[in-house]
Amino acid sequence: MSIIHRFNAFAIPASLRGSLCAALLAFTPSLSAQDAATDDFSSPSAIEQRLAAARAEMQALPADADHALRDRLQLLEFACQQHLASLDIANKAKLARDAATLSTTSWRGFAQTPPYSVILLDEVRENLARLAKAKKAGDTQRRIFGADLENARNQLLEHQQSERRFLDATNTGTPEERLAAQRNRITEQVSSRIAAELVARLNLRLEAEQAELDMIQAQSQLAELQLKAISGQVNFSQADLDSVLKRIANERTEALTLLKSNSPATDQSDPLLLWKVEFLNLEKSFWESRFESFNTEDPSIRKQSLTTLAELKKRVDDWIGIARIRLEGGTTAAVDQIDPTSLRNSLQRVEALERLISFSMDDLTGDKRGTPMMDRISSGLVSFWNMELYLAEETEIIDGKKVPTYRSITIGKLMRLACILTVGWLILRFLMRRFDKLASHKLKLSESAAGIIRKAGFISGLALLVIYGMNTVHIPLTVFAFLGGALAIGVGFGTQTLLKNFISGIILIFERPLKVGDSVEIEGVTGTIHSIGIRASIIRHGNGIDTLIPNSTLLENKVTNWNLTDSLLRHSISVGVDYGTPTREVSNALLAIAKEHGQILKNPEPEVRFEDFGDKALVFRLLFWLDTNMVSRDTLGSDLRFMIDKAFAEAGIVIASPQRYIQFDPDNPIRVELASNPLVHT
């Protein structure tokens, strides 16, 4: 592109300069339509290279360049950006498809035991309906992308033909005509590149749509498996009905409150709020009728419920029709104030209720129940829940006197305690993660100190949680009385070492002889300190293996810390050369290698020492300093050995190799005999 900038400096008329610049642009490295056929259109790096090339060509254009070419390059840049976005969409769609397929193949049933709630049944049915809509939309979108892809391929062929036609025109006609043909050829060439990007992008979108359809298919299979597992084992309890009615009552109260607060200010009620109140009344009638029909075997009641549901469905269908008309623009002056977004959200909810009514009517018309077993199952579950496991004795003070009382420990209490402990444990983990962020950003604590405080707080919170949970479910602490003696002895022996390491960890944090990130060596273990915990610290080796070392060991034993005062470290490389090699040349070559490497510190300067006259070689040692925060000593040592081998080979310096000399005693020659092989027959 520098040729164009030099070209702009010449005194050439502006009318010709833009055309000539366009002609010169044809000889710059770029992606032609022919190259597009062999280029990698599925690699992000290749697309980014083409995007960078388009931007570079745009920047190289002079101010008076052809506007058509400038517009084409801008479109090319946008096409490359869209191509990258489509590649990301395709990758995400494939990941979602694989995840959905895995979920379907690995599903082994619901976590809860049957009977299942009717609300769960409605959720599965609603999911199936949603997936059916999504599949229909995906099929339509795929057809649209297929048609667009065909058009893009035709455009690519047309631009390629035009490019070849203008290429032939550049060899005939007047100079002005040849320049015009060259300018048009460049424009068509960029258009071909745009079309090639579009073809590749639409191919990716087709792949993404197919992956989404496969994902929908897998999710539909999972929903069908769930529906099959639920069928025949559905229960509609009073608790389910109460939760639904409570939700409806709360929404109705909220809507009425808004109506009362808005009406005096505007002298006109919000039509959507009025509609919502009426809808909630209708939804309440639906759930009550459904509950009555679900929990009875009386044919007359079930028939009456079916009639009621049919009437409700008719009213809901009318609402859906009215809402769709209003969304399409068929509104009146009184309705013009309705927000289309709010109306669309209300329509979605009404449509969901319409599907629920249809499901309920199908259940009533096609339900074939056998002999009810729910009562006996429910009774058995209640008996299991209230099963008494242990009677705990405790003492209460009544009228100033100690009176022994007893509390039963049941399975239900233990399960409630387990739920409290689980929820509390999750909350404690969340709070500790929040504390980590607060400690690093606000309190400016070191990672080691924050780790000790976090773990101590977690253990204290867990102990308080156990006490709170037991008091909540009325389980006295005296249930552990029978373990008192053994527990006290075990705690005494167990906490002896625990307290020793805990105090050692606190000393390590405040004295700071070791910090997270330091490179240390202790008892033959070399690595980097990954964390300093309450009981032990973790040292991570270079191969990724972690070693747990008690904190007391770090204080009581000899520890080598390479980063105690600073991160600078001196390292050395030894090399042996053959006898007879000029020693000064070896020294100069090693110093030149050290200075050439960019990660060896200049101060202190590297030096070379003539180490020894070895048995078979002259031994030299290259000493240098490095910053361990910037580079590993092993990596730097490997780089230097590669450089030494190459530099010595180029300078003719021979690196000594191991040799052995064997000397025979002439006074005692070795006896050599030739013997025939008995296995070989002559």
Image (cartoon, rainbow, N blue to C red):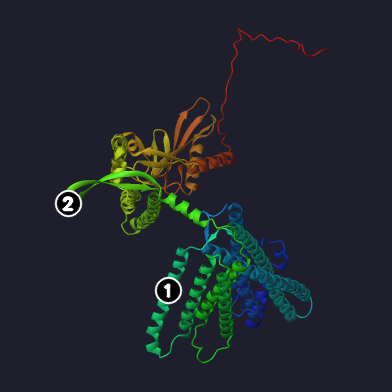
Q: Check disc 1 and report its element: helix, strand or loop.
A: helix
Q: Is residue 30 left or right of residue 576?
A: right
Q: Are marks 2 and 1 in contact (CB under 8 Å)?
A: no
Give the percent coordinates (x, y) of residue 226.
59, 58
Q: Amino acid at mark 1?
A: Ala
Q: CA distance from mark 2 to mark 1?
A: 47 Å
User: Furthest-right residue in view?
Assistant: 682
Lower sequence index among marks 2 and 1: 1
User: Furthest-bottom residue in view?
Assistant: 333
Image: 252 above or below 244? below
Name the front one of labels 2 and 1.
2
Give the percent coordinates (x, y) of residue 108.
57, 52
Judge by depth and name the residue closer to the eye, 421 or 472. Answer: 472
Q: Which residue is mark 2?
A: 399
Tell me the tag on residue 35.
none
Q: Is residue 20 left or right of residue 291?
A: right
Quadrant in the rendering for residue 320:
bottom right
Tell me the tag on residue 249.
1
User: Furthest-top residue in view?
Assistant: 667
Q: Residue at x 48, y 49 (%)?
A: 598
Quadrant in the rendering for residue 176:
bottom right
Q: Residues within 10 Å of mark 2 (few under 14, many from 20)?
A: few
Give the percent coordinates (x, y) of residue 68.
65, 79
Q: Is residue 493 left or right of residue 199?
A: left
Image: 385 above or below 615? below
Q: Amino acid at mark 2?
A: Asp
**Quarter containing the N terminus:** bottom right
Residue 571 appearing in the image: yes
Give the percent coordinates (x, y) of residue 132.
63, 68
Q: How many marks?
A: 2
